[in-house]
Amino acid sequence: MTAYPSVTAVVPTRDRPELLRAAVRAIVAQDYPGQVETVVVYDQSEPDPALTELAGPQRPVRVVTNSRTPGLAGARNTGTLAATGELVAFCDDDDEWLPGKLRAQVDALTAVPGAEFVSCGIRVSYDGHTVERVLERDSISLSDLLRDRMTELHPSTFLIRAAALRDGFGLVDEEIPGSYAEDYEFLLRAARSAPLVNLRTPYVLVRWHKRSYFAQRWDTISEALQWLLERYPEFATQPAGEARVSGQIAFARAASGDPRGAMRWARRTIRRNPREPRAYLALAVAGRVVRADAVLRTLHKRGRGI
């Protein structure tokens, strides 16, 4: 490679000043020969212009406000449209890029003709536990993603050609209910365009936080996942993948206090794949055998979600 392409890191943020600074410092510190611009997008919170002081040689830092739909999707798109780099990378404000991330990803992306998107493994930190999640594959197709969400493909690992975002498969969808699963929909759309390149190394520290799951939150999850099934009829070609999503809907209905809805979606899940565990977890929550938050805590300690 004669010249490394310029990169813009888009960092949406809302009320996490200390973690945000750690995220920006990790981006600025990347050992990458090309220019790395950081665009911090404040969403529904007051911008901190002092962040620009973290800039360094070939490492400009800009601060903007979300000018699109309030929320994560709109903030990412605001940053993408403001980016000057040939490549655009995402980083959440509570995550950190580890040393070597950017150089390794750019090398991998440019080595594959026609590639538009590259990801990598993650190191998940939750409640004092750290777990590495790495996909043992170098390429990911649409069929792969329909079968399995692959939570290793975290947004803070995404590096994409700017042209693909603006003139190709497009920006992050801002119409998904509650912006839930917008990263999964984005991956599906990107993989429709070209297979995703993946590195088998954990180059991003991802922090998962304890949180309260209110009924309204679960209603949003259920609505968003039903929207996803309608938007991607290709799920019908992958029974196990469709069962996984319908099992998540069943769990969300159970967690929101809708046992009838949970049982209806659990039955649909079992018809598509009798071995899908989310159906049985949903039935256990609906029957008050176990609490939804207890299930989530156990999964998160293993670096997994529902």
Image (cartoon, helix red, strand yellow):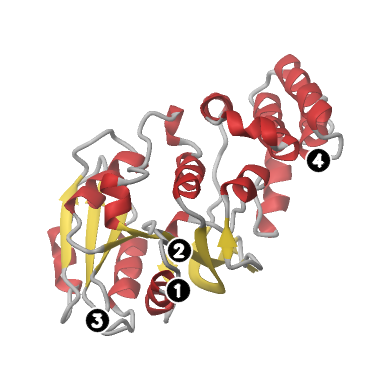
Residue 118, label in figure:
2
Residue on which disc 3 sits: 3
Residue on which disc 1 sits: 108
Residue on which disc 4 sits: 277
Looking at the rendered structure, the secondary structure element under dot 1 is helix
Amino acid on which disc 1 is placed: Ala
Above or below: residue 45 compared with residue 17: above
Question: Which picture quadrant has residue 90?
Answer: bottom left
Disc nearer the start of the sequence (1/4): 1
Would you say the residues marked 1 and 4 are in contact, meaning their CB atoms lie under 8 Å apart?
no
Disc nearer the start of the sequence (3/1): 3
Amino acid on which disc 3 is placed: Ala
Q: Between marks 3 and 1, how big is the CA–CA gap?
A: 15 Å
Amino acid on which disc 4 is placed: Pro
Label 3 neighbourhood size at 10 Å, few (<14), some (14-19), many (20+)? Answer: few
Amino acid on which disc 2 is placed: Val
> From the viewer's perspective, is 257 left or right of 266?
left
Disc nearer the start of the sequence (2/4): 2
Q: Nearer the viewer, residue 247 or 24?
A: 247
